[in-house]
Amino acid sequence: MNFVISNNSSIIEGLKYLNKQKINTLIVINDNRKVIGTITDGDIRRFLLQGGEIEARINEVCNKSYAYAKSKKEAHKILNDLKGENIRSIPIVDDKFKLIEVIDSDKETINEINFSALIMAGGLGTRLRPLTEKKPKPLLEINGEPIISRIIKKLSKTGIKEIFISIRYLGDQIKDYLKNGDEYGVNIQYIEEDEPLGTAGCLWFLPENLKNLLIINGDIRTELNFSSLLEFHTQKKSIATVAARNYIYKIPYGVLEISRENIKNIHEKPTKAYPVAAGIYVLDIHKIRELRILPIRRSFIDMPDIIKDLIDKNEKVKCFLIHEKWFDIGDIDTFNHLNKII
């Protein structure tokens, strides 16, 4: 069965299987085919965000309080009753909880969610000079393909057809290359800034009828499943969702655990994981306008300013961990590295 994985498998094996089969839920079984629990992409992201190791066993992460059924009829009823809780696969088990079959519901298409996208492509690319002296950073090629071209292909594949691109430095080159987006099956509109407005200033220029907006920096290379991100944002009813990447820092010394001058333990060269913003956001832009988070007149504002304002107003701001490959192509070393390995 495509939905089944052993409880002895690693989390990284589970991720590969979820992505390969393009499914939402895996049924976790032991050697005797007894159902131990279920695990979703979201379960894994939460585990990793809390500092869990990607090499850990599925058994440590899976949801052992899972929904199950004894017949197909019962399974379909449960799936319908739990439709709003992101449960799409139900195991059918016998009296000893051995797996008989898995019933899977149809996946909601992202087109029904109605998202637009904004690509931030106006930066100077100073750290990539001399490569960016005569070419804007989003048009630099990784193995023969411009960075921004790959981003647009991923957005189009996700179901997003309305794309805004914010341009400034050498922006005419981007317009000449991408044109109106027909080649990608999308509609591209350009936002041209005549002065620096910060990482969120261009939001002022967007049409007022926009509801949901995916924002991505034009120098990002990632295998992130955009559909999972947008689905998470919608299900959590979040006003803003910040995609994050775990930054791993290894402390080169023994760290002491101290209580009132007494050493309780010593941790030799521990590693710490810090979630950092990955240059990808999802916003309920309509709600943000209603809250007057954006300036009435165009002015300089950065994305962290918007996020902080929302937090201060006690609005729902969520974090979505990227466990897939992710690169910020901001310097020569990263650029050369990607052209060697991809």
Image: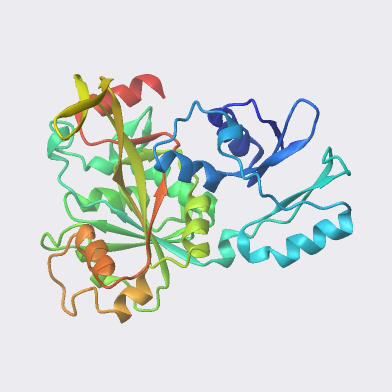
Q: Quadrant of residue 215?
A: bottom left
In percent of the image, x 52 and y 41: which residue is there? 44
Residue 24 placement (x, y as % from top left): 63, 47
Quadrant the N terminus occupies: top right
Does 159 sit left or right of 312 as displayed? right
Please indicate, yes or no, whether residue 322 appears anywhere in the rendered image: no
Locate the C terminus and report the quarter of the image it occupies: top left
Q: How is the image coloured?
A: rainbow
Q: Residue at x 81, y 60 (%)?
A: 76
Query: Does 41 sit left or right of 74 as displayed?
Result: left
Quadrant hosting residue 220 = top left
x and y, in percent, of residue 169 in the image: 16, 50
The answer to whether one can see residue 57 in this image is yes
Residues 217 and 51: in front is 51
Image: 107 above or below 260: below
How far across and down, in percent of the image, does residue 88 sit? 69, 54
In the displayed structure, 180 sits above or below 253; it is: below
Name the residue located 56 percent from the left edge and 38 percent from the top edge: 61
Residue 286: image quadrant is bottom left
Numbered marks: total = 0
Indicate the position of residue 55 as horizontal and vertical percent values. 49, 25
